[in-house]
Amino acid sequence: MPAATSLSPAADPDRLLPADPGTRAIARELLAQVENLPIISPHGHVDAAMLELDTPFPDPATLLVSPDHYVTRLIHASGVPLEKLRVGGTSAVKPRETWRQFAKAWPLFDGTASGYWMRDSFQHVFGLTREVNEENADALFDELDAKIKSPAFRPRQLFKDFNIEVLATTDDPLDDLAPHAAIAKDPTFTGRVLPTFRPDAYIKFAAAGWAERVETLISVAGDGLSGYAGYIRALENRRQYFVEHGAVSADHGVRTAQTLRLDDSTAEALFEKARKGEANAVDADVFEAHMTYQMARMSVADGLVMTIHPGVFRNHHTESFNKFGADTGHDIPFGVSYTEALRPMLEDFGTAPGFHFIPFTIDETAFSREIAPLAGFYPSVFIGAPWWFLDAPDAMLRFRGAVTETAGFSRSSGFIDDTRAFCSIPARHNTSRRIEAAFLARLVAESRVSEARAHEIIVDIVDAAPRRAFKL
């Protein structure tokens, strides 16, 4: 939606494009080719019920600050308690107070991806003409509050205005997917909202309530089988339920990329050990590696695209986790190896017809050293887009340079926004499109790719790649 005249950097039509005038001119033409294409978002965390019910957003702080751990973590690092940011939904602090904390901390976001996205959203979604600061915090809160209470800012209208064609959510295996079914049957809703099978809480022994959750899974979907056999059958059945409700992928937040092919008796012994509460951390890693292999086997059978997101120490600060829960800003990356870890799985399924496997990483060194070479050989492997701490302008450019010389353009997944922050989706996708235009413009300027071919490539990257990788 159009914004009023603004001095914000987000108002610059050439933002993120190359500084060199000649290269910038090429980038402008490339961006024009794709800037208004529909958004394909095949992995994210928006709540489908919000779109089904068209639930109004409550207030600016609850919409833009408290649920966005990219934002709250940096403010917390400056010394502000998470309670004051209303993280976890348990704080008595009023939204206006949280917004004031955010406005005071706004200079902290200069140069960060979060700052770029939020500034872009303020400009192009909300039409703010003033930069956020401590002095105008209350006035901006009131201005935003009035806007998000208007029909133009209801979720369904924004979904349409954002030009979203496909939006995937992330869902528990036992979710009944009723909001997805309701949206699919609604003739007034024009986009696709797809569920994604996310079984982490049923695979990780350390997950709170794992044993109870698994018992429920087996009783609901195990076809009368018990133990490990019932567990495997139940996962297969629930995956099929997701397929029947439009799912195209299964996502796995694994600790590492390790895959193992265990025999049934060994896997069953580990499973029973965990049910008795006797499994240790080594047992948990071995079982997760085995189940990653099993998830690949199931994907070959049912066609769900398999994505993995390894290399994150989840809930690094125990006190914060106990008080505020998961996804509250203290998940910290660690190094992960892919080549040897994935070999058992790729040996058996890497060339299986129809199998699509997308590994993500937040270790930049893995892109050129491991993931691009794997995608350059195995037909099943597509390179996951820069994720989490890497989905930032400079990191995106480094990613494209790291993988293209080995795997070309066709082996990537397309951009993944991976966000809960609904109003940042267009900013994130627009950022990616500008970076792709900048990268291709340099190749054209250096006579490494023809300009005509660059125009074809950028459409493929933005539109065809996610459709191809995620079977859309």
Image (cartoon, rainbow, N blue to C red):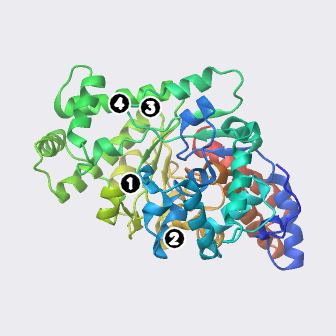
Q: Is residue 57 above or below residue 371?
A: above
Q: Earlier in the sequence, mark 2 or mark 1?
A: 2
Q: Is residue 228 above or below residue 384?
A: above
The answer for how far apart the CA atoms under marks 3 and 4 are is: 9 Å
For the residues bearing labels 3 and 1, Cβ distance under 8 angstroms: no
Q: Earlier in the sequence, mark 4 or mark 2?
A: 2
Q: Quadrant of the C terminus?
A: top right
For numbered disc 1, what is the local secondary structure?
loop
> Residue type at mark 2?
Leu
The answer for how far apart the CA atoms under marks 1 and 4 are is: 27 Å
For the residues bearing labels 3 and 2, Cβ distance under 8 angstroms: no
Q: Nearer the viewer, residue 28 or 46?
A: 46
Q: At 68% across and 67% down in the image, what residue appears?
A: 116
Please tell me in which quadrant of the rendered image residue 8 appears.
Answer: bottom right
Give the residue pinned by disc 2: 74
Q: Position of residue 182 (x, y in %)?
A: 57, 23
Give the residue pinned by disc 4: 236
> Residue type at mark 4?
Glu
For numbered disc 3, what is the local secondary structure?
helix
For the residues bearing labels 2 and 1, Cβ distance under 8 angstroms: no
> Residue type at mark 3?
Asp
Give the residue pinned by disc 3: 302
Which numbered marker is on residue 415? none
Q: Position of residue 420 (x, y in %)?
A: 55, 50
Give the residue pinned by disc 1: 326
